[in-house]
Image (cartoon, grey):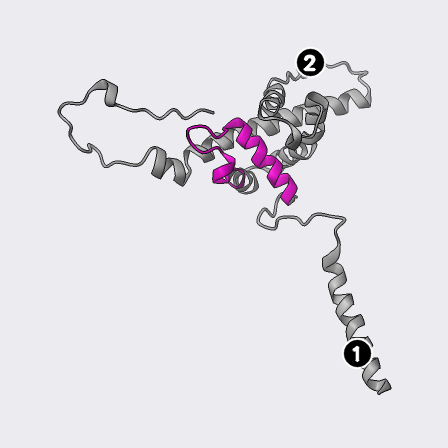
Amino acid sequence: MERREALKALALITGGAVLVPSCNFLKEDILIAYKNLQVTPSLQQLLASISDTIIPAGTIKGAAEINVQDFILVMVNDCMEPEDQKVFMHGLTSFNEYSKKVGGKSFSRLTPEEKANVVGAGLAIKIESEDTISPTEDDETKMERENQKALLEFLKITKRFTTQGFMMSEYIMTEIKPYKIIPGDYKGAVLVSDIKKEIIHG
């Protein structure tokens, strides 16, 4: 009987030891799909929210609804130089702090209008020319300037790939601007008022 109890206890201890590593909630898992970027699910969600602010849903779907953030991450991971990837990640990881500074809250807690204001302010950042920088500049000012530069570059990259990914998406190509064989159907008499043109904002 004692041997049976000892085996049960050993089985419980061994099983517990196997489960312990998978129960570490202190650090988020890194998404392995993007091997050159240290992207976590929360950062991916933040990027989705930023892209959706750049192209919000209206009469057609917004960027986040068609997962444009995945396209952005693939392009940065596969097509950009390591230095540019580093700048992108610097901007992404520091964006919530910038949002708190400019908008008063983390980005996810802002209203759509407030989000647009924060992104707009980030894209309007002016970077000083290297010629105008004082040689006696302190480390804190230098760090702040580098953060602003990274944030601006991050938003420019995000805006460019958001627009590209959105316009090249299956949704746009099949539902909004479906491909038609040239020259297409001939219609001899069409009223101008009957011609509809989709407005793609962004």
x, y percentage for residue 108? Answer: 64, 32
| Residue 39 visible | no
Q: Position of residue 28 (x, y in %)?
A: 70, 47
Rounded to the nearest angstrom, the CA distance separating label 2 from label 1 is: 73 Å
Q: Position of residue 88 (x, y in %)?
A: 62, 33
- What residue sits right under mark 2 in the picture? 131
Name the residue at 35% across, 26% down. 198
Left or right? Give the position of 6 relative to 103: right
The residue that appears at 66% across and 27% down in the rendered structure is 150
Q: Which residues are magenta?
A: 41-70
Q: Quadrant of residue 87?
A: top right
Q: Residues within 10 Å of mark 2 (few under 14, many from 20)?
A: few
Q: Is residue 83 magenta?
A: no
Tell me the kind of residue under disc 2: Asp
Q: Is residue 130 above or below residue 5?
A: above
* Secondary structure found at label 2: helix
Q: Secondary structure at mark 1?
A: helix
In this view, 167 is above or below 102: below
Q: Which mark is residue 179?
A: none
Query: Where is mark 1, residue-wise?
Result: 8
Q: Residue 69: say if magenta.
A: yes
Residue found at the very far bottom of the displayed protein: 1
Q: Which three-letter amino acid code belongs to the residue tagged 1?
A: Lys
Q: Outermost residue, left direction?
A: 188
Q: Is residue 169 left or right of residue 26?
A: left
Q: Residue 45 versus residue 82: which sits nearer the camera?
A: 45
